[in-house]
Amino acid sequence: MIVSPDGKTLIAVIDRNVRVLDVPEGIETIAPIAISCLTELEELTLPLSLKEIDGNGIMDCHKLKELVIPENVTETGFQCVEWCERLETITIPSHLQSISEALKEDNPSLKYVILSDSKSL
């Protein structure tokens, strides 16, 4: 895993065959394509410290079926989660409701977009 010198930005995940990825606490931003082309990734845990997912931050994670975006995330770039072809469920903070339609278009298997207050879109 490559992080910025201040330890606050995840720049890249090197191991393309990782099955479980726990992004460490203290990371505040996921840079563009930081979590990408991880074709074996089945489980992704994002830290509570996360505030921003840049555009294309999480992409091409073909085996990922579920994703929870932490409550502290206040900014998301265009197509912040895309081409995760088996992604079925994503939980997002209710204040990020506007990204739900793009998520559905970019992830063809997506069945449920759950707002953190338990509403489903």
Image: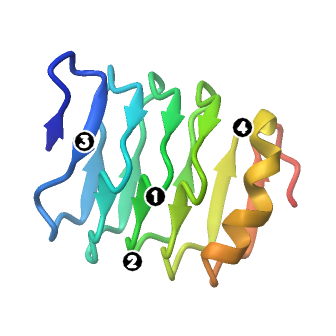
Label 1 or label 3, whichever comes before in sequence order: 3
Label 1 or label 4, whichever comes before in sequence order: 1
Q: Position of residue 81 (x, y in %)?
A: 53, 60
Looking at the rendered structure, the kind of residue marked 4 is Pro
Along the viewing direction, whichever of 6 and 69 lies nearer the viewer = 6
Q: Quadrant of residue 42?
A: bottom left
CA distance for labels 3 and 4: 23 Å
Position of residue 25 relative to residue 69, above or below, is above
User: Which numbered tag is attached to residue 93?
Assistant: 4
Q: Secondary structure at mark 1?
A: loop
Q: Quadrant of residue 41?
A: bottom left
Residue drawn at (46%, 58%), measured in percent from left and top?
56
Looking at the rendered structure, the kind of residue marked 3 is Ile
Label 1 or label 2, whichever comes before in sequence order: 1
Q: Which residue is mark 1?
A: 56
Q: Secondary structure at mark 4?
A: loop
| Contact, mark 1 vs mark 2 (Cβ under 8 Å) | no
User: Which numbered tag is attached to residue 63?
Assistant: 2
Q: Which residue is mark 3?
A: 11
Residue drawn at (37%, 60%), measured in percent from left and top?
43
